[in-house]
Image (cartoon, rainbow, N blue to C red):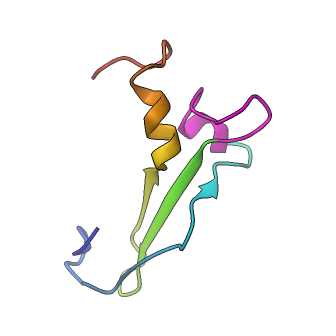
Amino acid sequence: MKPCPECKSNNVYRYKQPVDAAGPYGPDLLPKLAPGIFSQAKLVTVVCIDCGYIRLYASKDALKKLEKSEHWVPA
């Protein structure tokens, strides 16, 4: 996660736990990878303190479902 791909800074921070992909567009980020029918997939958020560049990563739980999902295909 370091250095920042935008400004090459090492002042990069990750939120301490994955967050829900909630909100109007959240479920569209990782469709069909939520742990349950009434939950959202989780994202790991990373931000550079120097330039504000933000990166989103799929959580480990979402990645576990990815290969077995019939809704996702290799790129």
Q: Is residue 65 left or right of residue 1?
A: right
Q: Is residue 52 left or right of residue 7?
A: right
What predominant SS class does the magenta segment belong to? loop
Magenta highlight on residue 63? no
Is 55 situated above or below 43? below
Q: Which residues are magenta?
A: 26-40
Q: Is residue 42 left or right of residue 40?
A: left
Q: Is residue 66 left or right of residue 24?
A: left
Q: Position of residue 14 (x, y in %)?
A: 45, 73
Q: Residue at x 52, y 43 (%)?
A: 61
Magenta highlight on residue 27? yes
For the N terminus, the quadrant is bottom left
Quarter location, residue 53: bottom left
Q: Residue at x 75, y 28 (%)?
A: 37
Q: Residue at x 59, y 26 (%)?
A: 32
Quarter location, residue 33: top right
Q: Position of residue 4 (x, y in %)?
A: 26, 73
Q: Residue at x 24, y 83 (%)?
A: 9
Q: Which of 42/7 is in front?
A: 42
Is 39 situated above or below 7? above
Q: How many marks?
A: 0
Q: Position of residue 46 (x, y in %)?
A: 43, 69
For the C terminus, the quadrant is top left
| Residue that lies at the very extreme toward the top in this rendered image | 70
Q: Which of 3/61 is in front?
A: 61
Quarter location, residue 31: top right
